[in-house]
Structures are given as structure tokens and as C-alpha cells.
Amino acid sequence: MELLSDPQVWASFLTLCVMEIVLGIDNIVFISVVVSRLPEEQAKKARQIGLLLALVFRILLLLVLSWLIGLTAPVFTAFGQEVSWRDLILIAGGLFLIYKATHEIHAEIEHETATLAEAKTASFGGIIAQVLIIDMVFSVDSIITAIGMAEHVEVMIAAVIVAIAVMYAASGPIAEFIKHNPTTKMLALAFLLLIGVALIADGLGFHIPRGYIYFSMAFAAVVEVFNVLARRRRQKVAGGEQ
């Protein structure tokens, strides 16, 4: 009850909510792209499991804050740069994102029939495994970033739950939009490449402000929306002329 009556707690809670939602954009884009190869019912189930895992990982990490903070301690030094377990996790996650995005882009460009054949053989377990890996990476990055913004674990957990709820509400429409607009999928894959590079840069000690990344993503997304609207307008006009 003391927490509920403290305005500073509410301020930190709202700030954390916004930050966790923004940091969750990466998670949503990745899940939306990888589940697009599954049948509709399995895709919905995979999104739900993916976001549930994201919630579980974040809460577990908050409950072991002392261990999590230990991940930022240097493990070894290479070329004059101290490297921690967090850095290694971010580098590994960035490499995985770059590999996955490159593989998907190659499949899209190589041949549509090949892509369809892969979609039919896509393993539900394999997709969940990929989501599991990236959930762990994004959870570590998200929670370590959140540490220091709130003094109470209860506030952090509440903010994470709200953020995951917003991500869940947004994941369906985003996944459907990507599914019905193929050019948007290529844009989403380009985002994943960008995020992968940013994770590797962070792991190597070169921090790229996320605001720059998210602004470029938002700008490209707005341009793509205009492209989609223009394409639909042209199709409608062409259909009317026939």
C-alpha cells in the first residue's frame, strides 16, 4: 500500500512501462517474421508461446537481480576492451539475428516456390526454439537497461507485465500486416539486420542510441504504409477500369 501512495513509484512505473514497450518492438518484429512460415493456427499459438516466454524470462531475471548484475562484470579483456557475459550474450544474439535475417532474405529473393516449400516443412518446435533464443537475448538487454530506473522489484515486474500485454495486443495486427503485405516482410527483415548490428556494436562497447534505430524504423514503416495504400489504390482503379 505504501508503494501505491508514492508518486515517485508511479512515475518510475510509467517510465518503465514506456521503456519496456519500446524495447519490446525488436521482440515483436522477430516473432512476427519467424512465425509467418507456420500455418495460421500454429502461428497464433507460436506468438502466444513466444510472448509468454518473454514474460517468464523477464520476471525470472528480475527475481535474480544480483546474478543478473554480475553479468556486467568483466570476464576477460581483448584488444584493450573489457568483455562481460552480457557483452557475449548480445554479440551472440546479434550474430543470430543477422544470420536469420540474411537466410530469410535469401529465401525471399531466391525463389517464391522454394519459400513456399520451406513454409510447408517449417517445424513448430524449431520456430519456438528460435523465439526462445532471441527472447533470452532481448530479456537480458531489456532488464539490465531497466535496472536503476526503479528501486522496487514489484514495480519492475508490474511494468514488464503491462509491456508484455501491450506487445501481445500489437503482435497479432503486426503479424497479419506482414503476412498480407510481402514487401513489408522484407522491410521487417532489414530491421532485424539493423537490430543485429546494434546488438553486436553494444556487445563490443560501441553503443548506438536506440532512438536513432527506432526513428529510422518508424520512418521506413510510414513510407511503406504509403506504398501499400498507393498500391491498393492502383489495384482498385485498375479493377474499376476492367
Image (spheres, rainbow, N blue to C red):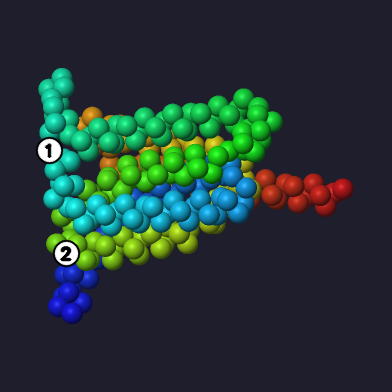
Few, some or many C-alpha atoms within 10 Å of disc 2 (few <14, some 14-19, many ≥20)? some
Q: Residue at x 34, y 35 (%)?
A: 93
Horizontal placement of 219 versus 161: left or right? right
Considering every residue shown, the one lying at the far front of the view is 125
What residue is shown with label 2? 152
Residue 38 vs 147, above or below: the answer is above
Instruction: State the residue in front, 52 or 25.
Output: 52
Q: Residue at x 49, y 52 (%)?
A: 47
The image quarter containing residue 149 is bottom left
Residue 215 vs 56, above or below: the answer is above
Q: Residue at x 58, y 29 (%)?
A: 107
Residue 118 seen anywhere in this rendered image of the structure: yes
Residue 142 vs 86, above or below: the answer is below
Instruction: State the residue in front, 159 or 213.
Output: 159
Residue 73 on image: x %, y %: 12, 38
What residue is shown with label 1? 73
Amino acid at dot 2 = His
The image quarter containing residue 217 is top left
